[in-house]
Amino acid sequence: MIKYRGHNYREALTPQQKQLKRQYRLEQQMKGDGIPSFEEVWEYHKDRAASKGSVEDYAADYTRVEADEYDTLEWLQQQGAKVPKEPRYDADDHAAWQEQVDALVEEHQETVSQYLSEQKALEYLKDRTEQLYDDAVHRLEYELDGEECWRTVSLPTNIDPAQHDGLGVYWAYDEYAAEAHWGSSYKGDTQQVTYHAKIDLQYVDKDGTIYANTDESLGEEEKEVRFHSGAPIYVYAVTVHEHGKHRRGDDEVLDINDWRTT
């Protein structure tokens, strides 16, 4: 600590100290990492779906249920409401009872329809999440280690992409799923590039990868493999896209064949 004019300043870390700090942070990330249970994953996505209105959207578009009289009366009883008991023999009493029931159904049928639709939507989302979860766990345990991965980013044109480090943690295990999610592919002052690297499973953020791949709306599309921040990653090459990844142009492939960090 350096004191100057009444203020305290931290001394700059040496390159060796910076490396030790990065290594410590990486070890801390890896220490607590693991594959979350399906129950944890489902609770997370269920809460997110509710907060984003996804359950209501599915209920309206895909799992609409029209409640009948029986559904409505059963729901009312579950809510603790007083539902008149059906008389067995007297026709007049039965007619009066039916009028009461019809009034109750008319008042609450839409609410019950919405409730049943949302319950069906949740069942669908849970089944879908479980399928994505099983697939993601299988990939982590049996497929990804040693395989290839890609990351597309936008960089300022004054940065040499072959020398660039700190490549980021979000990669894709499918080349065509790697997309730049910020910046523009062709503004003159930026360049869009795609890094091609090797997956070392010990540095994969398993928790983050599972949650990303079980997102019902994005998991299959983005095919994400997430690394711990600051992890070493072996990079084969980087492709510089002349006019962006999906536009025609003369792409340039620069060999790297060296280690970088995420």
Image: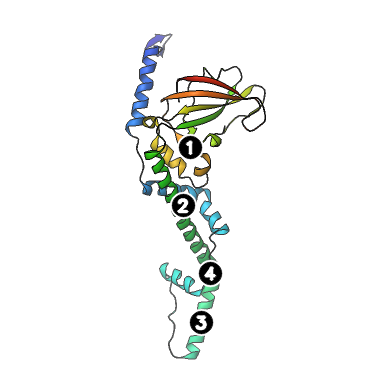
Q: Which circle, 3 or 2, is nearer the viewer?
A: 2
Outermost residue on the left side: it is 31
| Nearer-N-terminus badge (4/2) | 4
Q: Which circle, 4 or 2, is nearer the viewer?
A: 2
What residue sits right under mark 4 in the picture?
109
Residue at left 39%, top 16%? 18
| Nearer-N-terminus badge (4/3) | 3
Disc sitting over residue 224 in the figure: 1
Real-space CA distance between mark 4 and mark 3, rounded to the nearest whole angstrom: 15 Å
Residue 255 on image: x %, y %: 52, 20
Residue 239 on image: x %, y %: 57, 25
Q: Residues within 10 Å of mark 4 (few under 14, many from 20)?
A: many
Residue at left 55%, top 29%? 152
Q: Is residue 215 above or below residue 260?
A: below
Outermost residue on the top side: it is 4
What residue sits right under mark 3 in the picture?
98
